[in-house]
Image: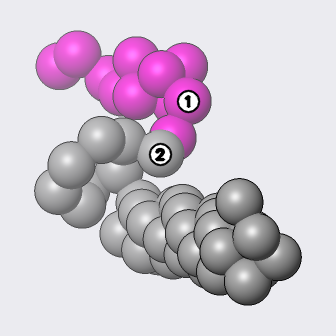
Amino acid sequence: MNAETQSIIAIFTVTVAVGYLVRRWWVNRKRASQGCGGAGECACPTAKISNKPTS
């Protein structure tokens, strides 16, 4: 590979990595703001969920 191809691959790899990290951060932020009542996976520990009264 020549230097130009390597730099294109490096830029692409960094862009994908940054995009992945931003997406993970955004999903976790949205999930935390929804709390356990939100759709999708629950961000709260299971201990909090099991402490609900059974009456």
Q: How is the image coloured?
A: one colour
Return the x and y of residue 48 as percentages of the image width and height: 52, 30
Q: Is residue 24 magenta?
A: no
Quarter the N terminus occupies: bottom right
Give the residue at x 51% y 41%. 44
Amino acid at circle 1: Pro
Q: Which residues are magenta?
A: 44-55
Q: Residue furthest front?
A: 2
Crowding near pointer 1: few (<14 within 10 Å), some, many (20+)? few
The residue to which callout 1 is attached is: 45
Residue nearest the observer in this picture, 41 or 1: 1
Residue matched to label 2: 43
Vertical side of 28 occupied by 52: above or below:
above
- In the rendered structure, the answer to whether residue 21 lies left or right of residue 47 reads right
The reply to whether residue 20 is in sight is yes
* Alpha carbon distance from label 2 to label 1: 7 Å
Q: Residue at x 17, y 56 (%)?
A: 39
Q: Which mark is residue 33?
A: none
Q: Nearer the viewer, residue 21 or 38?
A: 21
- Is residue 18 among the parts visible in the rendering? no
What amino acid type should be assigned to the residue bearing mark 2? Ala
Residue 3 in which image quadrant: bottom right
